[in-house]
Amino acid sequence: MTETFINRDHLAALAASFGVTLDETALDRFDAYARLLCAWNEKINLTAITAPEEIVVKHFADSLSLLQVAGLPQNAALIDVGTGAGFPGLALKIARPDLRVTLLDSTKKKLTVLADVSRALGLSVELLHLRAEDAGRQPAFREQFDVAAARAVANLRELAEYCLPFVKVGGRFLAMKSAKTDAELEEAKAAVRLLGGKTAAVHPVALYEAGARTVIEIEKVSPTPALYPRPSAKIARFPLK
Ligand code: SAM
């Protein structure tokens, strides 16, 4: 048997603690993903997390924790906004191949990596090289997704303007955040409402040795007004309040 790169048992146990069963195919794919991530990271700066054990906990398990807090329906359409090296979107696709996953990022080289990795893993995902605020105005993407997820992209007030336009009414926006979110949530309240959202829940996530995290779950209760998302300069200079 070839040596594995990651500790598969640890990943399987962390996933199980979130109620996620990873079969052999998924574990093989995670192993290959970690190898490719490290190989690509030698050429371009993708992630500061490069030790296999840290990749398991801080990238893979953290991404999978979304499945614990938000049961995603079979075949749900999910867009990962500012996916970077594929977190959480590509990790979710490995665990749940039924999901229809779109990975969006404004940085071309990240999409090049994701094209290589998804091909190597034999997974079909949609790759979008666009800024979120441009994609969110296009009819092909606007209000087309059951779920928009994002990790480490922007503060919630801006992130809501990037993400909520993608979500169908009745769908959800899931923002993966650090442990303390009270102030950020308060600051984003008006923006969330204006964009057609309603905060449904704030889920604490225990990421074991990597500490606590939070997933903010926002429900889309009405269509996003046509005015949003605004151009990037406006979003940055005049945050919604
Ligand atoms: N979500 C990944 C993770 O948690 O590992 C990547 C996080 S990285 C810090 C932020 C990513 O968001 C970068 O890849 C960046 O190119 C992308 N990004 C930032 N603003 C964006 C925007 N307006 N539209 C699309 N992508 C954006």
Image: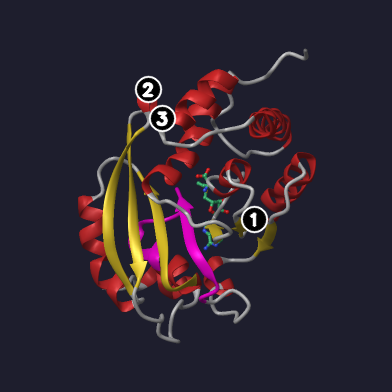
Query: On the rendered image, what quadrant is the N terminus found in?
Result: top right
**What residue do we see at 45% from left, 45% from top?**
67
Density class for disc 1 (Cα within 10 Å; few <14, some 14-19, many ≥20) is some
Answer left or right for 35 relative to 66.
Answer: right
Q: Earlier in the sequence, mark 1 or mark 3?
A: 3
**What residue do we see at 51% from left, 76% from top?**
143
- State the image coordinates of residue 204 (x, y, percent, origin top left): 28, 41
Answer left or right for 204 relative to 112.
Answer: left
Q: Which residue is mark 3?
A: 17
Q: Which three-letter amino acid code belongs to the residue tagged 2? A: Glu
Depth check, front residue: 186 or 236:
186
Chain part drawn in magenta? 143-160
For the residues labelled 1 and 3, the Cα–Cα distance comes to 34 Å
For the residues labelled 2 and 1, the Cα–Cα distance comes to 31 Å
Density class for disc 3 (Cα within 10 Å; few <14, some 14-19, many ≥20) is some
Q: Earlier in the sequence, mark 2 or mark 1?
A: 1
Q: Which three-letter amino acid code belongs to the residue tagged 1? A: Thr
The residue mark sitting in front, 1 or 3, is 3
Q: Can residue 202 be found in the magenta stretch?
A: no
Q: Total number of numbered labels? A: 3
The residue mark sitting in front, 3 or 2, is 3
- State the image coordinates of residue 195 (x, y, percent, origin top left): 36, 76
User: In the rendering, which numbered label is found on residue 107?
Assistant: 1
Give the secondary structure at mark 2. helix
Q: Which three-letter amino acid code belongs to the residue tagged 3? A: Ser
Give the secondary structure at mark 1. loop
